[in-house]
Image (cartoon, rainbow, N blue to C red):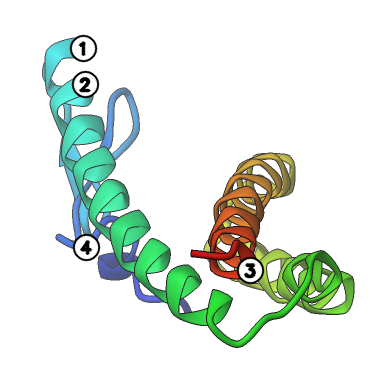
Amino acid sequence: MANPRRRDGTGASVVRGEPARQGTIRAVTLDDVRAAIDRIDDQIVALLAQRQQQVHAAARFKQDDAAVEAPARRRALMARLNDRAVEEGVDLEVVTATWTAMVDAFIALERRDVHARQQPE
């Protein structure tokens, strides 16, 4: 069984109108819900910064756009994340849309790194 304490890094999620469960905080107002979402968003941005560092590191190993795009890696990533989404009870459309946009953005960043490295000084 998945540990609900992993969901937002604090073990808390906000639910209004549902019985309290382990790892759940009763939301009193919409502002409470928004504050919880803001805390989660802050954690996501920090994780994106870590992911970006790894993307820059990966770019150093790649020589061209084909290596950057790595379609087999992308398929494997999406399959793994779909499995994780099912385990965590996250809507698959949300996971697919979120990671598609994120991976596209990071591929563009990585492509810029590779192209910049190939430019004569």
Q: CA distance from mark 2 to mark 3?
A: 45 Å
Residue sitting nearer the eye, 22 or 81: 81
> Nearer the viewer's eye, disc 4 or disc 3?
3
Q: Are marks 2 and 1 in contact (CB under 8 Å)?
A: yes
Q: Quadrant of residue 57?
A: bottom left
Query: Which residue, given by chain and number where applicable, does mark 4 sit on?
Result: 9
Circle 3 sits in a helix, a strand or a loop, which is it? Answer: helix
Residue visible at 19% across and 52% down in the picture: 12
Q: CA distance from mark 4 to mark 3?
A: 40 Å
Circle 4 sits in a helix, a strand or a loop, which is it? Answer: loop
Q: Tell me which numbered mark, 4 or 3, is placed earlier along the sequence.
A: 4
Q: Position of residue 44 (x, y in %)?
A: 31, 50
- Up-down relation of residue 29 to residue 89 (above or below): above
- Up-down relation of residue 105 to residue 118 (above or below): above
9 horizontally vs 7: left or right: left
Q: Amino acid at mark 2?
A: Arg
Q: Tell me which numbered mark, 1 or 4, is placed earlier along the sequence.
A: 4
Residue visible at 73% across and 69% down in the picture: 68
Q: CA distance from mark 2 to mark 4?
A: 16 Å
71 horizontally vs 32: left or right: right
**Residue 109 circle label:** none
> Nearer the viewer's eye, disc 1 or disc 4?
4
Q: CA distance from mark 1 to mark 3?
A: 51 Å
Query: Which residue, given by chain and number where applicable, does mark 3 sit on?
Result: 118
Q: Tag 4: Cα neighbours inside 10 Å, few (<14), some, or many (≥20)?
A: few
> Nearer the viewer's eye, disc 2 or disc 1?
2
87 horizontally vs 3: left or right: right
